[in-house]
Amino acid sequence: MSRFRVGLGVSGGIAAYKAVEVMRLLQKSGCEVRVAMTRHATEFVAPLTFRALSDAEVVVDDYDPENSDPIAHVNFSQKIDLLLIVPATANIIAKFANGVADDFLTSTYLAATAPVLIAPAMNTTMWEQPATQRNVARLKADGVRFVEPIAGELACKTVGTGKLEDVENIVRQALEILSRSKGSNDGENDGRTGDLKGERFLITVGGTREAIDPVRFISNHSSGKMGFAMAEAAAARGAEVTVVAGVTAVDPPEGIKVVRAVSASEMHKAVSSELTNATVFVGAAAVADYAPANAADAKIKKDGRDTLTLELKKTPDILGEVSANRHDGLIVVGFAAETNNVIEFARNKLEKKKLDIVVANDVSKPGAGFNADTNIISILTADSADDFAIMPKRQAADRVCDAIKKLREERGR
Ligand code: CTP
């Protein structure tokens, strides 16, 4: 059996012939590809080409009396791990963005729960039209990913942006999405790929570093593993993710926007500027609670002293501030790393900072510490507390995503 199933949607542009190459490359990479075409696309490439190469029926019109499956769009959409549109015309983008479902491909988009990747190709003016850009922005906000068109000579002999990205790059991005979401499908999020589509996560990750002087700093043991696992889990389930990362011992997952912020005050600033767009805020960073009140401009010399006193001042409480000034619909999640009275301290945090969810862990337990790949978490909300056994951080992140999803269902947007 193939590792991944891709629904390849072909709409009516001159670049439709390149969809054949995309299909071949996907097949070589171990994907099973089923093709859906718009009527206009069939003017550029015959359905028979795809049918012969994919050895499967190519669906064009849901309502064709010859069609063996009368609800093909529903069945087709439920059997794919990714819906990839190559090429996407301005028209199909406009229809997707507005929920129009007047043919097989548009109905499939509406019925799909799999991630969606769109590779547009069109004339530069059409691409740059405010209407098209508005539709693209709306789809991105809905969690759809794009392989942006590139600049070059177009079929209409003009030069500008609108050319389909190289097929290799399209396939590479498709495979990245597939391996991320399928990874979580394989037991990590129990198959709920796409259930966070439409959410925009802002996550703080890692430890901060507070300068004492130009060569010394105060920091902590945070590795960033749990925060990056949260980012990966949310993205695999269809959310758009931005991470504000302090100091981390591991690389961020691919395909995620990362803003670096080393100190608590830089992190505070970065969060403030990214926050307006977010629907979920997760404070997974180990932010220093105190920083040197006056970092020295030059290296501090011993000067014969036996003791040295540093004055520390409180850093901004990023999580507390986000929670206190939250915009409508924002879900706020905090972490509580404790060494004793874990649940009691975590519940205090939930109430004091008015959080929606607190993820608590006892960092003194083996398998739940800063650098471990596993965690032992409890997830607290105002009216629940769930304890989980030791599990990989990536899986623990999915349990937190489940709690976020549940809250969203209860509250709406
Ligand atoms: N946090 C933050 N900004 C800070 C400090 C902490 O955003 N300046 C966030 C962390 O990302 C984490 C949560 O707040 O989600 C931890 O809460 P906090 O009360 O700061 O934890 P402790 O430092 O453990 O608190 P306490 O002093 O009660 O032990």
Image (tube, rainbow, N blue to C red):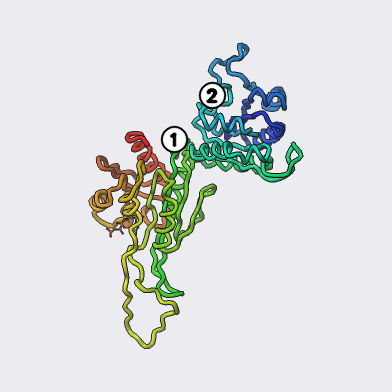
Placement of the C terminus among the 4 image quadrants: top left
Q: Which comes before the other along the chain, label 1 or label 2? A: 2
Estimate the spatial distance between the alpha carbons at disc 1 and disc 2, rounded to whole Å: 21 Å
Look at 58% across and 26% down and name the residue there: 105
Rendered location of residue 277, percent (x, y): 44, 46
Q: Is residue 313 visible?
A: yes
Q: Given the image, on which type of amino acid does mark 1 rest? A: Asp
Residue type at tag 2: Ala
Q: How many marks?
A: 2
Residue at 62% across, 27% down: 34
Q: Nearer the viewer, residue 68 or 354?
A: 354
Quadrant of the rendered image containing residue 124: top right
Quarter location, residue 50? top right
> Callout 2 environment at 10 Å: few (<14), some (14 to 19), or many (20+)?
some
Figure quarter occupied by ligand 1: bottom left
Q: Quadrant of the N terminus?
A: top right
* Residue 378 placement, left or right of 190: left
Closer to us: 306 or 367: 306
Vertical order, 237 against 372 (above or below): above
Identify the residue at image location x=76%, y=39%. 157
Q: Which mark is residue 273?
A: none
Q: Position of residue 173 (x, y in %)?
A: 60, 42
Residue furthest toward the bottom? 304
Q: Secondary structure at mark 1?
A: loop
Instruction: Please give the label number shown on residue 101.
Output: 2
Asked whether, in this view, residue 128 is left or right of residue 356, the answer is right
Image depth: mark 1 or mark 2 in front: 2
Does dot 2 land on a helix, a strand or a loop? loop
Answer above or below: position of 392 versus 312: above
Quadrant of the image occupied by residue 39: top right
Residue 195: assigned label: 1
Residue 229 on image: x %, y %: 45, 48
